[in-house]
Amino acid sequence: MERLSFLLKQAFALMDEATERELAQLSVNGREFAVLTLVDAEGAASQQRLAGRIGVDRTTMVALIDALEEKRLVTRRRDPNDRRAYIVEATPAGRKTLQRALKAVELAERQALAPLTASESTALKQALQRLAEAALARDAKQPDHD
């Protein structure tokens, strides 16, 4: 039996490859998709908040927003409450691309999970959801060091 960490890495690689392949057809990558998903779910947000939510540094976030802005999928404006910060919002084209990307990701998930039965796929998703929720709860209990 392989180690869990190895199996998870292999499963992630399979899912990541399928997802990136499908998203590439829309001219976006996984991180850009993550930004669009967060902005859609949470509304306009600061670059700093988005960076923290998807786990990238500020420099990487600036590059992501630059790329999305160049594709006209988001707009960036100064935060009226903090002139040092920028607020990011999805454009109509960004929202349309996100809807198409969500369908592409669903297709990628079906492709990656094809070797599993429907009940195995459901059980896997439920187990991973519980692990993710536990991680979020643990992180919420950690004191901020900002």
Image (cartoon, grey):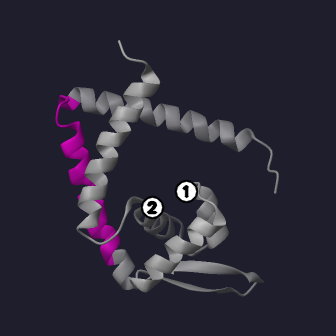
Residue beneath the point at 26% across and 71% down: 26
When the figure is inspected, residue 123 is found, relative to residue 136, above or below; the finding is above
How far is mark 2 from mark 1, CA to CA? 8 Å
When the figure is inspected, residue 65 is found, relative to residue 17, above or below; the finding is below
Q: How crowded is mark 1: few (under 14 residues within 10 Å), some or many (20 or more)?
A: few
User: What residue range appears in magenta?
Assistant: 96-118
Residue beneath the point at 67% across and 41% down: 139
Number of numbered discs overlaid on the protein picture? 2
Task: Kindly state the secondary structure of the residue where label 2 is placed.
Answer: helix
- Spot occupied by residue 99 in the image (x, y as percentages of width and height): 30, 68
The image quadrant where one finds the C terminus is bottom right
- Spot occupied by residue 126 in the image (x, y as percentages of width and height): 39, 32
Is 92 placed left or right of 135 in the picture? Answer: left
Which mark, by number, is residue 131? none
Kind of residue at badge 2: Arg
Is 63 placed left or right of 8 in the picture? Answer: right
* Residue placed most toward the observer, 105 or 92: 105
Q: Residues within 10 Å of mark 2 (few under 14, many from 20)?
A: some
Quadrant position of residue 68: bottom left
Query: Which is the main secondary structure of the residues drawn in magenta?
Result: helix
When the figure is inspected, residue 64 is found, relative to residue 130, above or below; the finding is below
* Residue placed most toward the observer, 113 or 24: 24
The image quadrant where one finds the N terminus is top left
Kind of residue at badge 1: Ile
Residue 98 inside the magenta-drawn segment: yes
Task: Kindly state the secondary structure of the residue where label 1 is placed.
Answer: helix
Residue beneath the point at 75% across and 41% down: 142
When the figure is inspected, residue 10 is found, relative to residue 49, above or below; the finding is above
Q: Are marks 2 and 1 in contact (CB under 8 Å)?
A: yes
- Spot occupied by residue 143 in the image (x, y as percentages of width and height): 80, 44
Q: Name the residue under label 2.
A: 31
Which mark, by number, is residue 54? 1
